């Protein structure tokens, strides 16, 4: 005779033992592939909406600047030094000039694109030069220590005691420098902070257990530096570069504004501002447009650098 159960009655099954549930959880964890440091950093960066928006702006500004020849050829159809005195001080949008013209009738959009390109090229080359010089000296001082560290750090102290702006103005007053030389001059007064940063980080890393173990096993210095030290210093260097780039753009703009940087007729954002000061009563856009490009570029790169710094900071861990 079949067993009769009340309506809605459900048969209870014995609960699984706690040990089996723990084993299932452990097996699921084991099947989950751990994410690399780069994937974790990207996940943290992607959650920062301000940093994601800033990287879009940075890419647009870089595309605008380094696409200057294409803008000149296909959009404005004039070069950055093409003059038309009959068309001077045209307002934005007037007679087909998208951003107007300056006091010599030169197209502002074309000059702005080439000026942004020049300013960013100088800043990027200055960052690369400072990385090479500061990174090399900082690494030598931090890894080898002793008298090498003493000599390099005393030289760094001497360089830091000299006001950077004064030294830049002094060098540019004595010598007429082009864009490439200007980048090297900026780097020559800007590498000291990076050298001290890398020195301190390497002095901390070289005392860690895995570096000591590699040294005990007979690994040469070159292998220890390339395999164990440099990968741990790279995030700091990347963050420094993203924060130094906008600073160098401002330095180049300031020197060019003072007439000590990129010389006319080659446009840069700084000398465009300098030229516009004289004719601000004729057209306010001549000073607003390059000033706004400097502002938005520096702001976007700074926000991107801050987001990258937070994403690469291992102390944040996984949220």
Image (cartoon, grey):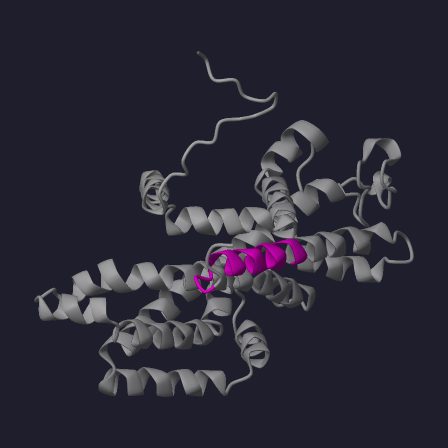
User: Number of callouts in the render?
Assistant: 0
Q: Position of residue 152 (x, y in %)?
A: 32, 82
Q: Is residue 176 magenta?
A: no
Regarding residue 245, the answer to whether it shows in the image is no
Q: Which residue appears at 67% of the width and 57% of the height? A: 299
135 or 49: nearer the viewer: 49
Check the image and report above or below for 158 versus 10. below
Give the side of residue 179 with respect to residue 97, left or right: left
Q: Which of the 4 quarters of the picture holds residue 93?
A: top right
139 or 201: nearer the viewer: 201
Q: Position of residue 100 (x, y in %)?
A: 82, 41
Q: Position of residue 84 (x, y in %)?
A: 79, 39
Regarding residue 92, the answer to whether it shows in the image is yes
> What secondary structure do most residues of the magenta stretch adopt?
helix
Give the side of residue 305 with respect to residue 16, left or right: right
297 or 304: nearer the viewer: 304
Q: Is residue 307 magenta?
A: yes
Q: Position of residue 141 (x, y in %)?
A: 29, 78
In the rendered structure, which segment of residues is drawn in magenta? 299-315
Q: Which of the 4 quarters of the picture holds residue 213?
A: bottom left
């Amino acid at each position: 005779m079949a067993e009769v159960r009340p309506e809605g009655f459900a048969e209870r099954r014995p609960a699984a033992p706690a040990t089996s549930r723990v084993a299932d959880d452990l097996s699921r964890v084991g099947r989950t592939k751990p994410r690399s440091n780069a994937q974790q950093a990207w996940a943290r960066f992607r959650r920062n909406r301000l940093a994601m928006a800033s990287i879009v702006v940075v890419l647009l500004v870089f595309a605008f600047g380094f696409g200057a020849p294409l803008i000149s050829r296909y959009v404005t159809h004039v070069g950055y030094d093409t003059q038309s005195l009959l068309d001077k001080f045209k307002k934005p949008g007037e007679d087909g000039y998208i951003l107007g013209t300056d006091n010599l009738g030169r197209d502002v959009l074309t000059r702005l694109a080439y000026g942004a390109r020049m300013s960013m090229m100088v800043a990027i080359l200055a960052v690369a030069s400072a990385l090479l010089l500061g990174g090399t000296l900082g690494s030598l001082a931090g890894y080898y220590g002793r008298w090498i560290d003493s000599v390099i750090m005393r030289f760094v102290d001497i360089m830091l005691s000299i006001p950077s702006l004064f030294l830049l103005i002094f060098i540019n007053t004595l010598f007429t420098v082009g864009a490439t030389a200007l980048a090297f001059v900026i780097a020559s007064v800007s590498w000291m902070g990076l050298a001290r940063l890398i020195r301190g980080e390497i002095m901390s890393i070289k005392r860690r257990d895995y570096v000591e173990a590699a040294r005990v096993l007979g690994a040469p210095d070159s292998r220890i530096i390339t395999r164990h030290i440099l990968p741990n210093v790279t995030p700091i260097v990347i963050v420094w570069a993203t924060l130094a780039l906008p600073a160098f753009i401002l330095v180049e703009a300031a020197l060019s504004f003072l007439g000590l940087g990129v010389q006319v007729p080659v446009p840069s954002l700084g000398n465009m501002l300098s030229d516009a000061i004289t004719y601000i009563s004729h057209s306010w856009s001549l000073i607003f447009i390059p000033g706004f490009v400097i502002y938005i570029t520096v702001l976007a790169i700074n926000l991107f650098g801050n987001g990258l710094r937070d994403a690469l900071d291992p102390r944040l861990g996984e949220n």
